[in-house]
Image: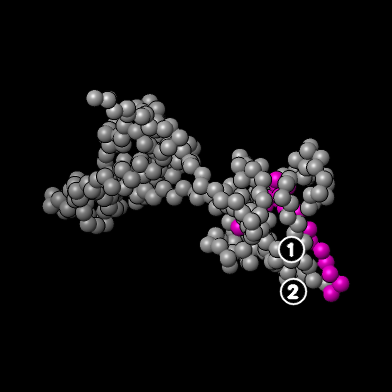
Amino acid sequence: MDTQQISAPSRASSGVVHDNSRHTSRFTVVGNHLTQHRELSLTAIGLAAHIQAMPAGAGIGIKDLAGRFPESEARIAAALRELEAHGYLRRTRTRLANGRIVTRTVSCNQPSDQRRTDSLPGRDCPQRTVRPPTPVRPCSEPEADDAHPARSRTRTHTKPAPRREPAPLLVPKPAFPAASLLRTATDLLAGLHHQDPRLLLSEQDVDALAPGVAAWLEREVGPAAVQHALTTDLPPEGMRRPAGLLAHRLTARLPPPPPFLPPATLPPGPIPLQNCEGCDRAFRAAEPGECSDCRTEDFHPTAQQL
């Protein structure tokens, strides 16, 4: 009995397999230097192949191409700039006799620098000096002819996103911002980095947080207690803005005001001085009158008794 031979699977089955048919009509020859270009995007390669297959005189403006394909005008404009930078397109603007600005587009089936190297005759595009590649910028460029010459030169550029400024620090304010309280608060904030190096604050942050610390000190909270409330249970990581965390703690953990204490009873003041109405001598009494000497009922001798 014969043993059945098991053939190993072909390694070529894991890659692409070509099922080609020879074209006899309606075909375009596209070079591998374009289809396998390492620096062009797939959008640019496909757009170049489409343009090379178009008949002479066909419209290939940005709006024309955007009407045929699902890509946006911005993406098509970027692909055209790629092809122009690598020598597959030449676009020049020409002013006509009536003042209109038109764009002349020349499609090259082989880049200019490669034609000079190969010295092959019969190409569609004449040899020219290759300019440095134009960097692709995220902007939409008008491609179709425009009725207004000044408007045809306008370009809509994407503005850079504005820089976001940090939110202002909101902290409680003391009822009576005494200079001594603010000085103590500033010294406390400037020394927080000794407890945690991440709490090294800038001068601007210290000035913004000082009123919040002064509000705590005004409510009879000592500097040590304020420092403990600000530096304990800090997150182990992710402190991108320490001043914002301190401002939140100063606001969210603000203690209540101390209880109201009525003023203590003042001791009685000194008895005021009065001038005696009898002898005009000074004496202390609550009301005006005579001194004790003038109010005595001692017997005064008369002339008969002398």
Answer left or right for 64 relative to 113: left
Q: Position of residue 243 (x, y in %)?
A: 40, 40
Q: Can you give x and y, in whole percent of width and height, for residue 81 in the image? A: 67, 52
Q: Nearer the viewer, residue 33 or 263?
A: 33
For residue 286: magenta?
no
Q: Which residue is mark 1?
A: 56
Q: Quadrant of the N terminus?
A: top left
Q: Circle 2 is placed at which residue position?
A: 147
Which one is closest to the eye, mark 1 or mark 2? 1
Left or right: residue 243 versus residue 127 is left
**Residue drawn at the location 73% of the way across and 55% of the way down:** 107
Q: Quadrant of residue 189?
A: top left
Is the Cβ of the residue at disc 1 closer than 8 Å to that at disc 2? no
Pointer 1 or 2: first along the chain: 1
Q: Nearer the viewer, residue 204 or 301?
A: 204
What's the magenta region? 76-98
- Which residue occupies 38% across, 32% down? 9
Q: Using the rendered image of the protein, determine whether residue 116 is visible from the camera's viewpoint.
A: no
Find numbered disc 1 in the image and state the secondary structure of the residue it sits on: loop
List the single residue furthest toward the front. 1
Q: How many marks?
A: 2
Task: Count neighbours of disc 1 (C-alpha within 10 A) and say few if under 14, some if 14 to 19, many if 20 or more.
Answer: few
Residue 273: image x %, image y %?
28, 50
Cα separation between marks 1 and 2: 23 Å
Judge by depth and name the residue closer to the eye, 49 or 301.
49
Residue at image point 64% right, 60% down: 26
Amino acid type of the residue that numbered disc 2 sits on in the rendered structure: Ala
| Residue situated furthest right in the rendering | 97
Question: Does 104 sit above or below residue 81?
Answer: below
